Image (cartoon, rainbow, N blue to C red):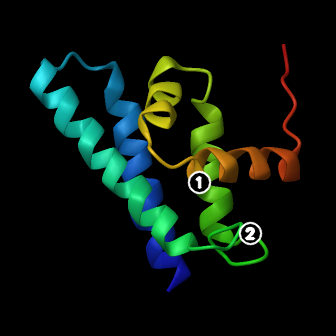
Amino acid sequence: MVYRFIWKYWKLFRIYFSSAKQKTSGLKKIEKNAKMQSVFDEFCERMGVNPFHGGRNPDAADFRCYSLLRRVYHTFTVKTLFEQRKDKQLEVWFKRMNALCQPRQMF
């Protein structure tokens, strides 16, 4: 069951961020943004009051989604998506995953 959600979230995240390079009209951007926010809502709903999607410990869906968001986190798009959310659960989850994974930047 977890793998079905991994594919669902990761596929939508990947499509959203990989197609961001294409020129789109204002209406399409709004529609894409709304769809991505609904995916974030579902992800947060599945987390519930738990710190991770997998419960007390992260599961494969946590790591897969985190890896994609981390890869494009420096972009304006991700920061805007986080800022538009009313609840900060996704941002808190991202910071928690960041602390757990301790990513390093290579130059």
Return the disc, 2 or 1, that comes first in the chain's sequence.
2
Residue 14, quarter of picture: top left
**Residue that appears at 71% across and 67% down:** 51
**Residue that appears at 40% across and 58% down:** 41
In the image, residue 29 above or below residue 58: above
Residue 56, quarter of picture: bottom right
Disc 2 from disc 1: Cα separation: 15 Å
Q: Pick the residue in front: 104 or 55.
A: 55
Residue 42, quarter of picture: bottom left
Where in the figure is residue 23, as x and y percent of width and height?
21, 15
Residue 57 - label: none
Q: Rate crowding at label 2 as few (under 14), some (14 to 19) or many (20 or more) other CA atoms within 10 Å.
A: some
**Mark 1 lies on residue:** 89
Three-letter code, disc 1? Gln
Q: Pick the residue in front: 59 or 47.
A: 47
**Mark 2 lies on residue:** 58
Three-letter code, disc 2? Pro
Callout 2–callout 1 Cβ contact below 8 Å: no
**Residue that appears at 54% across and 20% down:** 75
Q: Pick the residue in front: 85 or 71.
A: 85
In the image, residue 82 above or below residue 62: above
Q: Helix, strand, or loop for circle 2?
A: loop
Camera-nearest label, 2 or 1: 1
Where in the figure is residue 24, as x and y percent of width and height?
17, 20
**Residue that appears at 47% across and 56% down:** 10
Q: Is residue 107 left or right of residue 67?
A: right
Quarter of the image that includes the C terminus: top right
Q: Rate crowding at label 1 as few (under 14), some (14 to 19) or many (20 or more) other CA atoms within 10 Å.
A: some
